[in-house]
Amino acid sequence: MILKSALRHWLLFLWLFCSLTACRQEEAFEQRDYPRLRETLVLAVEKASATFGGTVLSSGTSDIIDHGFIWRKAVSSQPDFKDIPENFTAMERISLGSLRGGSAFQSTVSYGLEAGQSYSVRAYLKTKDGYTVYGQPVAFVSQGSALPVITQIQPESAVWGDTLTITGTNFSYLSENITVFFDEGLPAKVLSATPTVIRCLVPESLTKEECKISIKTVAGIATSTATFKLDTSRPIIAGISPALGTFGETLTITGKNFSGAPQYWRVVFDYNYYQIQGVVTDVNPTEIKAVVPALDRRFSSVKLARVSSSRTIVSDPAPDLFQMKPPKIASVELLSSGVSKWVKVTGSGFSKPAVTFAGVRADADARVSTEFLFNPADGVFPRPTSLVDLKVTSAEQEDSQRISFTYTAPWVKRANRDIGPFSGSPGTPIAAFALQDNGYFLFSRDFYSPVQAYRYNPQLYDWQRLPDLPVMAGAFSGSNLGTVVIDDQAYILSGKMYESTPPTMWRYKPATNEWKEVKAPGLPITSNQYSNNRPYVMTGIGNKVYLLAGEEGGSLWEYSAVNDTWARKRTNLLPASSVFSGAFSVNGILYGVSIGQNQDVAMLYSYNPASDEWQLKTNFPFAIANATRQCTAYSSGQLGYIVSMQETVSYDPASNTIKRLLQNPGNSSNTYTNTILGFSYQKNAYLLNAAYLDFWEVTHN
C-alpha cells in the first residue's frame, strides 16, 4: 500500500510538472481564439471511483464557461472517440463549471463506471463564444463505482402518473443505466437523470398504498429508508361550470383530490347508466378541465374517475346536472364538388344531430357544435325549387325551418311513400309507360278493386290522379307487367304466375280511358320469365310489338297491332341462367339486355326485323349493379340507355360501345333490390321502386 500511494503521488507530481512546462512553452507560440487541451490522464482507478486529469495547453481569448470529463464504454470500431454527440446526451460526464486561471484540473468520479468494463475518457472545455474542445482520449479498465444513495423523495405521496423527484448521489446521466423500482420489483418510467437527481413516473399498475423505492445503477441497488405513499383519496366535486354547454366546449370542475396527469383522469357524463367520457385537458389539485363530448341526452350527471391499469376511483356526482344547449339553425347552404353535393348547416348546439331534410332522415357529419354536413341525395324534391323542411334534433331538443331549396342533380327523388301522390297508399305499382309527353303508373290495391292510374307531367312536375280503369286488379294478380307504346296506345302484357292460366294482354287508350283485351302470345304457363316474378321485356318498332320472353332458352315474339296476331320468331337466344332484363330500339333495330345469374355477365343483343337477324353485339365491360337483374331500357336520339335503381349506362350502336354514366348517390340505394318500373321522356328516365315507392328522375347530359 505504501508503494501504491508513493506511485500515485509521483504521477501527480509528474503531471503538474509537465503542465507547468507546457504553459511556459505556450508563451512562445501565437495565442489562438479557442483553447487547446493536451492528452487526458487517468490519475487513479480504484474500487469505487476513478480520477481523471486534464491540462490546458492554451486558454484562448474567450472565457471558459465549463470544463470537465466525458467517458463511455470503449468501442472497438471507433477507437478515436470522435463521434461525440452534441451536449453529450449519450455519455456519462462530470461538469466542473467555469475555469479561471491555472492550467491543470482533475476530478474523481464515483458513478457511471461498471467493474471490469473498458472505458475511454476525454477532458473537455467550453467557451463563452461557442467553442467546445477536447483532449486526447485515453482508455482504462474500471474497477467499479459507488453504490447509489437516496436522500430524499418528493413528493412523499402521489397518484399514478405523477412525477417523482429522487435526490441523492452516485446516480447517472444515462437513463438506460438507471432503473427505479416500486415495491421491490415494479419498474417506473425514468424521465431524466443526473448523478444527483432522478425524475420518474409513478407506475399506473402500482397497487400497494405504501412501499419502498429502489434504484439500480451499474454499481448495484440501493433502497430508500423513507416510505412512498400512493394517493388513493377519492376525488370530491364541489361544482361544474358552465352548467349549460354543448359539444366541444370546455367544462371546468372544481373540488379537491385532483392531482395526477390528465391521461389518468376521466370525466363521465351519466344518464341512467348510459355513460360517455369527456377528454381531460388539464389537471391541478383543485380544478380539472375537460372537453364536453357529443351527448344525445339533455341532462347528465357528471362524475370524475381516476383510472389506472390496476384500479379505478370514482367520485360522487357533481351537485348540479349538466344541461346541453338546444340546437339552433342559423343558415343552410348547398355545396357542390363535381357531381357530389352536400348541405352545410351552421348554427349552434349541434351534438350528435339527427337530421330530417326534405322528408327523409339524413346522416349528419358533425365534427364541431357550430356546423355539420349531410348528403341531400335521399331527400324528396318535387320540383327544381321546392319548399322543404329541415329538422335538427340534438340532445332531446329540436329546431326546424322551412326553406326554399333549389336542388339539381343527375339523380333527384321527386316523390316517395310520404311525399307526393303515393301518400294515400295506392297499393302496389304494376305497370309504367310514357305516352304523349306524360308518364303513367298503374296500381293494384287488392284483387277485387279497380286498377288505379296516375299521370305525371315531367315538364310541370305535376301529378294527377286519373279515373280508375274499367278492369279489376285481379286481372293482373301476382304479376309484374310488361308495357309498350305504339300508335299512342299502351299495350300491357300480364302473366298470372299463381294461376294455371296463360298470360293476357290489354290495350289502353288514355284519351278515352278505354281498355280492351287483345291477343296474348301463346307462352307456356311455366315460362320462367314470369315464374321468377320479373316484368316481361317489351319494346316497339313501328306498329309492331316485340317481346323477349324467358321460355325456350330465351325467345323472341312479334305482335301485329293491325292483325292482332302473335308470332314466335326465334328461340334459344340466351346462355343458361341468363334472363332478359330490358329492351330498346334505335333506327328500327331492337336491342335486348340480358344479365347472368350472378350479375357478373351482362350481354347486349340486336335483332333486325327486316332481315330476321339476331346477333350478340357486345359484352358489358363491368357487372350491372342490380340484384334483381332488372332494368329500364329506352332510347333517345341515336343512343340507348340502360338504367337500374343504382346506376345508368349508355350504348352507342354506331361504335358498339357501352359506357357507365352515373351512379345513384342516394343513401338507401342498397335497399333497391325490388322490382322497378319506369318510363322515359326525352333524355330522362323516371324510375319507381315497387316496394318503397321512391320515384326518381335521372338526367343524362
Image (cartoon, rainbow, N blue to C red):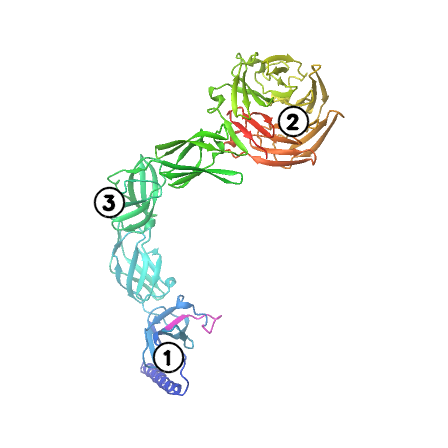
| Image location (x, y in percent) of residue 70 | 38, 71
Against 58, is 639 above or below? above
- The residues tagged by marks 1 and 3 sit, at their Cα atoms, a distance apart of 62 Å
Circle 1 residues within 10 Å: few <14, some 14–19, many ≥20: some
Could you tell me which quadrant the N terminus lies in?
A: bottom left
Residue 61 has which mark?
Answer: 1
The residue drawn where x is 64% and y is 37% is 621
Could you say which disc has been placed on residue 236 in the image? Answer: 3
The answer to whether mark 3 and mark 2 are in CB contact below 8 A is no
Residue that numbered label 2 is attached to: 583
Q: Give the magenta part as a residue range.
A: 69-81
| CA neighbours of label 3 inside 10 A, class few (<14), some (14 to 19), many (20+) | many
The quarter of the image holding the C terminus is: top right
Identified at 43% across, 68% down, the residue is 85
* Residue at the limit of the structure toward the right, as seen here: 611
Q: Which mark, residue 626? A: none
Answer with left or right where residue 77 lies relative to residue 484: left
Instruction: Inspect the magenta stretch and tell me whether residue 78 lies in it.
Output: yes
